[in-house]
Image (cartoon, rainbow, N blue to C red):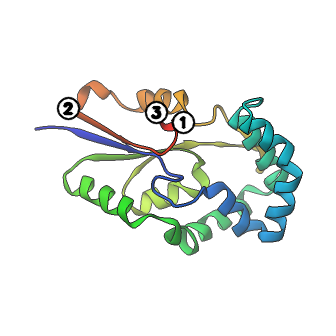
């Protein structure tokens, strides 16, 4: 029997937008998002100019918007986001491709730099394995930091290899839309 595994990036590949901005918008509102982006603009520019890493810029953003948010409150809003907002962001073609793989008994895995808090529930609903960035929690509150490494670039490869023995698969397929997915 041929064994196949398919890895999908989430933001921009399965979704039509970056979900970090959308989870901020959902939890904090448009005004807070735009004010925050203005405050963060030096950090975002530094990231675009490759002066700081994506992970460092992401932590600045997470800290600004979510630091000291009780984990239970944050997760409850993430769960609501999965139910209320995320379905509108899913690309129909990506979902068709995922379902085609599942019908062919392909192991389907989402590998994403987004936090598992707003991706894992969707993956569970769709019977998909999820490998995601983890947020650091201190005293049951979001710290604004990433727990471990941001699941982007080579870290995606490291996480995949930690979870799967790829030599057990005859076919490996990967879907992504950025250089961080290569």
- Which residue has dot 1 on it? 180
Q: Would residue 71 appear left or right of 41 to someone viewing this image? A: left
Q: Secondary structure at mark 2?
A: loop
> Is 81 placed above or below 53 here?
below
Return the mark for residue 4. none
> Is 45 placed above or below 89 here?
above
The residue at the point 51 percent across, 72 percent down is: 88
- Which residue has dot 3 on it? 182
Residue 139 visible at all:
no
Q: Are marks 1 and 3 in contact (CB under 8 Å)?
A: yes
Q: CA distance from mark 1 to mark 3?
A: 6 Å
The residue at the point 54 percent across, 43 percent down is: 132
Which badge, 2 or 3, comes first in the chain's sequence? 2
Towards the viewer: 137 or 59 = 59
The residue at the point 58 percent across, 71 percent down is: 85
Return the mark for residue 170. 2
How many other residues sit within 10 Å of disc 3, few (<14), some (14-19) or many (≥20)?
Answer: few
Residue 119 visible at all:
yes
Towards the viewer: 75 or 176 = 176
């Amino acid at each position: 029997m041929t064994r196949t595994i398919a890895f999908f990036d989430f933001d921009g590949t399965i979704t039509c937008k970056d979900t970090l901005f959308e989870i901020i918008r959902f939890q904090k509102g448009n005004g807070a998002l735009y004010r925050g982006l203005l405050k963060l603009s030096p950090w975002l520019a530094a990231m675009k100019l490759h002066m700081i890493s994506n992970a460092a810029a992401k932590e600045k953003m997470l800290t600004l918007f979510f630091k000291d948010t009780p984990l239970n409150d944050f997760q409850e809003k993430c769960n609501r986001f999965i139910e209320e907002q995320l379905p509108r962001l899913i690309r129909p073609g990506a979902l068709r491709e995922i379902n085609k793989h599942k019908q062919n008994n392909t192991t389907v895995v989402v590998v994403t730099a987004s936090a598992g808090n707003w991706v894992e529930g969707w993956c569970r609903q769709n019977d998909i394995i999820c490998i995601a960035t983890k947020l650091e929690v201190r005293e049951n509150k979001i710290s604004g930091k990433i727990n471990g490494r941001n699941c982007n670039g080579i870290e995606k490869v490291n996480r995949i290899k930690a979870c799967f023995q790829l030599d057990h698969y005859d076919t490996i397929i990967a879907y992504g839309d950025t250089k961080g997915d290569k």
